[in-house]
Amino acid sequence: MEWTTISDMARPLWLVWLMIIFVGIAFWAYRPGNKERFEKDAHIIFDEEKNGGQHG
């Protein structure tokens, strides 16, 4: 088997693999369990100003 043949067969699999990864990351980012964590992370810069640079 030549590399070009293998490449031609694998190309559609990469599309499927990347779509699965994209959907998985989107699901992880938007699931309700992560909302509190992301809200907390979004306000880190404001908390640093209030606490003098101390996290917590």
Image (spheres, grey):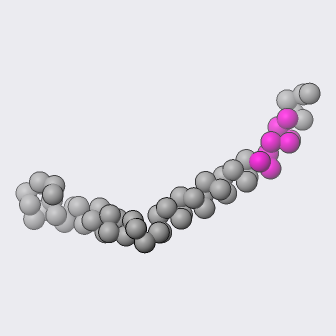
- Give how far across and how far down residue 56 sits, in percent: 15, 57
Please give left or right for residue 39 compared with residue 50 in the image. Answer: right
Q: Is residue 23 above or below residue 1?
A: below
- Give how far across and how far down residue 36 sits, in percent: 32, 69
**Residue 6 occupies which quadrant of the picture?**
top right
Residue at 23% x, 61% y is 44
Please give left or right for residue 35 compared with residue 5 in the image. Answer: left
**Residue 24 occupies which quadrant of the picture?**
bottom right
Question: Does the magenta portion include 11?
Answer: yes
Q: Which residues are magenta?
A: 6-13
Question: Does the magenta portion include 34?
Answer: no
Residue at 47% x, 64% y is 29
Residue lying at the far front of the rendered structure: 33
Please give left or right for residue 9 compared with residue 50 in the image. Answer: right
Residue at 8% x, 60% y is 51
Q: Quadrant of the N terminus?
A: top right
* Main SS, magenta residues: helix
- Give how far across and how far down residue 5 sits, in percent: 90, 35
User: Can I make out residue 42 in this image?
Assistant: no
Tally of numbered discs: 0
Residue at 73% x, 54% y is 16
- Give how far across and how far down residue 9 sits, in percent: 86, 42
Q: Is residue 8 above or below residue 17?
A: above
User: Can I make out residue 12 in this image?
Assistant: yes
Q: Is residue 28 above or below residue 8?
A: below
Residue lying at the far left of the rendered structure: 52
In the depicted view, which residue is nearer to us: 10 or 52?
10
